[in-house]
Amino acid sequence: MKLVLASNNKHKADEYRAMFKNEHFNNLSILTPNELTDMDIEVEETGSTFEENALIKAKHIFHLTKHPCFSDDSGLEVTSLAGKPGIHSARYSGTHGNDKENRQKIISELQKLHTEDWSAQFRCVICFYDGKKEYYFEGICKGKIIDEEKGAGGFGYDPIFIPEGYDITFAEMRPDEKNKISHRAIALKTFQEFLISYKE
């Protein structure tokens, strides 16, 4: 079976391929759009929720590639910031993908609040679309924000997020360690359970 990830983000594709490496998915290939088409795959995320954005991307890439497609939308939700940055996580500082400025803005905003509550969670919603119907799978990883960056791994907000039960950030973890507990891993586990019994 060929599954298309509705993203050309290399970090994300590598994470998903690593997490699909088990005996249940030996015959599954995870492809990215640029491996199947030369067409422009930039998709404007106009939804107001993770679910809506994931569906928009999955449907768009399905219509380009004609293969079952899955997409995720995920972000950081900070309790004291009323759930921000949420769906705006990748462009919170104003520039899409400027991870360092995004992290600095979160720290700065929490410091201005003079609050001791730096709790946060990463939330991920996976949407699978087969041309007929969409299916959703959610994963949440709770933790807290810290006021200095630690670790050289990961991406996004990983260097300032410590998951519950740990004393190191996502960015300090080995990829295989993070892939066991991350929001994406939790959502993917339920998606994988669905795929084992799914019939095209």
Image (spheres, grey):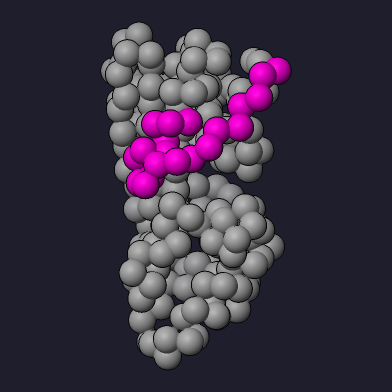
Q: Quadrant of residue 31?
A: top right
Q: Which residue: 32% across, 43% down?
A: 138
Query: Is residue 10 left or right of 200 when viewed as pictured?
Result: right
Query: Is residue 26 left or right of 113 when viewed as pictured?
Result: right
Task: State yes or no: residue 42 in magenta.
Answer: yes
Q: Which residue: 45% across, 27% down?
A: 58
Find the residue positioned furthest to the bottom: 114
Query: Is residue 42 left or right of 1 when viewed as pictured?
Result: right
Viewer-proximal residue, 163 or 88?
Answer: 88
- Does residue 64 show up? yes
Q: Quadrant of residue 126?
A: top left
Q: What's drawn in magenta, residue-wise?
A: 38-57
Q: Which residue: 37% across, 47% down?
A: 48
Please, is residue 105 above or below residue 57 in the view? below
Viewer-proximal residue, 196 or 59?
Answer: 59
Please, is residue 80 above or below residue 41 in the view? below
Viewer-proximal residue, 189 or 57?
Answer: 57
Please, is residue 158 above or below residue 49 in the view? below
Q: Position of residue 107 (x, y in %)?
A: 54, 77
